Image: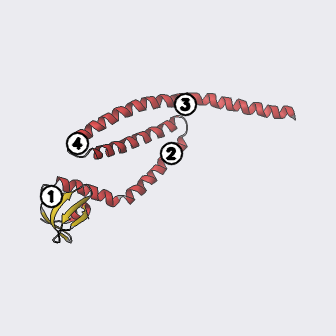
Amino acid sequence: MLALQFGLVEAGINQFVEGIAGAIPRILSGLVFLVIAAVLAKLVMIAVRAALDRALRGESDVYRRFVSLVVAAFLWFGIALSFLSIVGLDQIAASMGTAAGFLALGVSYSLSSMIADAVAGVYLLRDPDFMPGDEVKAGDVAGPVTSIELRKTRFRDENDDTVVRGNAEIEKKWTK
């Protein structure tokens, strides 16, 4: 009976050692991939920051940093999924990718009005006919535009009060 138990323990240890020995090449491949991917990610981020500096020259640094952060998050998430796949954890990588897709869908749905305001804000900021100081009627508000921001526009109404409206609402229908 003792010999049978010893044989089971020895077989278990042998399987464990063989499993580790078999995993070493995949782990080394994964580590080499991570080093190469880190260097390439750094180069991509340098290029992204340079492009954003040129494209958003007059804008606040906050926008450039936000876009850089989003690009870096997607880049590193892709690297992490690839690493898991290289080391033999394909099912975990597929599960994480699927979960991230559902999470992105939920976030985009919940932020859809904010995204619409931001996109409309970009159009309003670039529109030469819609500038601070212009007398504008937008829906139930009429008065001079005091400021145009990425998501909101501020007006001064006839009572000299500040009225704030989302850019998506204004961009749909405004008259000068």
Disc 3, SS: helix
Above or below, 83 against 95 in this view is above
Q: Which image quarter holds the C terminus?
A: bottom left
Q: Where residue 89 appears, x then y in whole percent?
A: 55, 39
Kindly identify which residue carries mark 2: 94
Q: Which image quarter holds the N terminus?
A: top right
Question: Residue pushed farthest front?
Answer: 160
* Numbered circle sitting on residue 27: 3
Task: Using a 10 Å C-alpha cutoff, classify the residue at mark 4 as few (fewer than 14 neighbours), some (14 to 19) or many (20 or more).
Answer: few
* Numbered circle sitting on residue 141: none
Q: Give the spatial CA distance, label 2 vs label 3.
A: 19 Å
Q: Are marks 2 and 4 in contact (CB under 8 Å)?
A: no
Name the side, left or right, on which 100 lies relative to 42.
right
Q: Where residue 111 appears, x then y in whole percent?
A: 36, 58
In front: label 2 or label 1: 1
Task: Using a 10 Å C-alpha cutoff, classify the residue at mark 3 as few (fewer than 14 neighbours), some (14 to 19) or many (20 or more).
Answer: some
What amino acid type is highlighted by mark number 2?
Ala
Which image quarter: residue 27?
top right
In front: label 1 or label 3: 1
Kindly identify which residue carries mark 1: 132
Q: Tag 4 or tag 1, which sits nearer the N-term?
A: 4
